[in-house]
Image: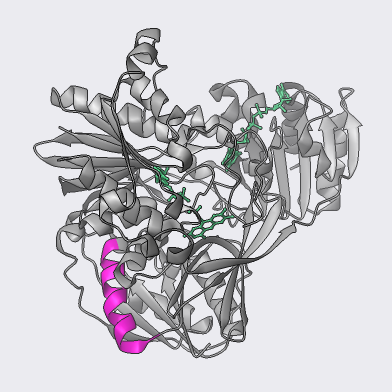
Amino acid sequence: MNIAVCVKQIPDPNVPGNLDADHTLDRSAKPQIDDSDMYGVEMALQLADKAGGGEVILVSMAPNGEVSGLRTGLAMGSARAVLVSDEALAGSDALSTAKVLAKAVERAGDVDLVLTATESTDGYTGTMPAQIAELLGWPSLTFAKHVEVGDGKVTIQRQTEAGYDVVVASLPAVVSVTAGVVEPRYPSFKGIMAAKNKPVDQVTVADLGLSPDEVGWSGARQQIVSVAAAPERQAGEKIEDDGEAYTRIVSFLEDLKII
Amino acid sequence: MSKVWVFAEADGDKPSTATLELLTKARELGGTLEAVHIGANADALAAGLGEHGATTVYAVDPGDALPGVVGAAALEALIGEHHPELVLFAQSYDGRDAISRLSVKLDRPVLTNGVALRVDGDKVIVGAAIFGGNTLVDTEFEGEAPFLAAIRPKSFAAEPSGGSAAAVVAVPAPDAGRAGEAKVLERHVEEREGPKLEEAKVVVSGGRGLGSAEAYDPLVEQLAKLLGGASGASRAIVDAGWVPYSKQVGQTGKVVKPKLYIALGISGATQHMVGMKGSENIIAVNKDAEAPIFGIADLGVVGDVHKVVPKLIEALQAHS
Ligand SMILES: Cc1cc2nc3c(=O)[nH]c(=O)nc-3n(C[C@H](O)[C@H](O)[C@@H](O)COP(=O)(O)OP(=O)(O)OC[C@H]3O[C@@H](n4cnc5c(N)ncnc54)[C@H](O)[C@@H]3O)c2cc1C
Ligand SMILES: Cc1cc2nc3c(=O)[nH]c(=O)nc-3n(C[C@H](O)[C@H](O)[C@H](O)COP(=O)(O)OP(=O)(O)OC[C@H]3O[C@@H](n4cnc5c(N)ncnc54)[C@H](O)[C@@H]3O)c2cc1C
């Protein structure tokens, strides 16, 4: 079974983000694999293993031919990657990104399953999984907290407001996984060394058969009109617990008429 | 706006609160207000939808297919017929599926994670909070209607308009092709005592400072129960598998705006605070006097949750 995993290479999420003058996210720092996508990679490796073979292929769109995040996914055990990098992609919105990723999945070869995270850590539009599925004409099984594959079918537990639903579809399909679906492995030293020689197929927008007007600023059809700091909330009273602080909480609750 | 649509979702046999919030906001934009519901219970929703301003609800029964996929296919056809200018979705599980697929079908951009919405002439502008809620960004649609936006729950208050029940127009479920193949086999409803997280007047949340999964029940659940509230969590303990994702408060979890929010052993990362700083009152217990959560707490207690909370619980039990 061949599985494509969407892997987003993002700026370090622990460093406060910045918008560039053109209102896009500052991506000048060395990117890393989005933590959320580590779950997809791990899930794919486990499913391929259970199926008794097949490749895990990473798919990514990133500026400047970035591969540092992909190397992590390759070191975990993925076989190869398809990376779309092109100046024409600057300013792409979610829909254009989905168009690119769907084409990149097709370029990856015959895949039975596409795995993504439910939302990325930096953009968190949260639309990519179902958009990619719609572009491919496939079912999408979203918000999976458990995934099983067998007999040409994929079955997931889909997170809901009230609990979860068991959802099934035949392959090929797109599945988005939530954090915690599996425990991502740490790349081994051997894996890290092996990753250096694994193939990364670097492609442009034209290689995918897309027109530059469909992507980037020209494709986006939305425009940021203002950026402002959010209003701040003030701190109130602060006390040190001397063993009796709970009484202050009780009186606070009484003042609010909660008790 | 001449016509605004809301993708209406159900919570049991009532419209979801997020749906009512969207309808309330949409009323301000003027024009005809209608709803589209993908589910079997439109008749039961009609009164609530009408009371919040919708005149008509187009209803499609998806059977056991995922509502988002059928919803997008149905919306594509209905939009072609009725031409709404703006279609609003809640940033929910099904709302996200539907808006994503619809954007491809119509080849229209989407604006998601909205927390504000306004119309300026013929421009529709969606406000979102980024970087953990520190920065507000307004984005405007370009090009032609319909505009598609997904709004985070709790962004607006739901207020009834006093309208009468919406007229239900049943629409046959369209064939969503291969995409429509995903079927729901079973539904599991997790037992929940007390109010829903987003609707509770009191929310008690726990973080990594609890030390272990075992501490969650006796400290967080207990306190929440005593106060008639709901229990929440930081992402750190959701990712660690201590509690389910449905309890997560924050940027990638739920937004809550209770009368009182109690944060136990939560540092106060911006991504957590964006989900709770709209609370009317905030109490925080944290043993680190420098924890960022104290920057927004009305009452900050520098102390150990394992010492403060059991005493508090005991006092409350004695109180009642
Ligand atoms: C402040 C700001 C606000 C924005 N708001 C919007 C908006 O409202 N609407 C909009 O259309 N665009 C918006 N954008 C642009 C948007 O962030 C990105 O252009 C677009 O790539 C959406 O990706 P995402 O990460 O949000 O997708 P998501 O849907 O959140 O990503 C889900 C999953 O898809 C996969 N994935 C996503 N992107 C990639 C990638 N490049 N390579 C590999 N896998 C990937 C990953 O598995 C990811 O976990 C905004 C940008 C900024 C800076
Ligand atoms: C894109 C993105 C989205 C995110 N979305 C969310 C989200 O939706 N919700 C969310 O919560 N987080 C989110 N996060 C994660 C967030 O950045 C923090 O990692 C997380 O909130 C930390 O959780 P915590 O406060 O429980 O843990 P920690 O940061 O580890 O804090 C634990 C705190 O407990 C205190 N403590 C320890 N022992 C005790 C004790 N015995 N008594 C009292 N206090 C004690 C410590 O002093 C510390 O302040 C997101 C991160 C990113 C990058």
Residue, x 77% and y 46% (percent of image)? B282
Residue, x 35% and y 34% (percent of image)? A40
Residue A175: x and y in percent read 29, 44
Residue B122: x and y in percent read 56, 85
| Closer to us: A15 or B199 | A15
- Membership of B79 in magenta stretch: yes
Left or right relative to A207: residue A258: right
Left or right relative to A27: residue A7: left
Asked whether the viewer can see residue A183, the reply is no
Q: Residue furthest top?
A: A190
B114 above or below A62? below
Residue B239: x and y in percent read 50, 31
Residues drawn in magenta: B69-83
Residue B62: x and y in percent read 24, 67
Q: How many marks?
A: 0
| Closer to us: B282 or A42 | A42
Left or right relative to A149: residue B252: right
B235 above or below A172? above
Picture quarter containing residue A219?
bottom left
- Membership of B114 in magenta stretch: no
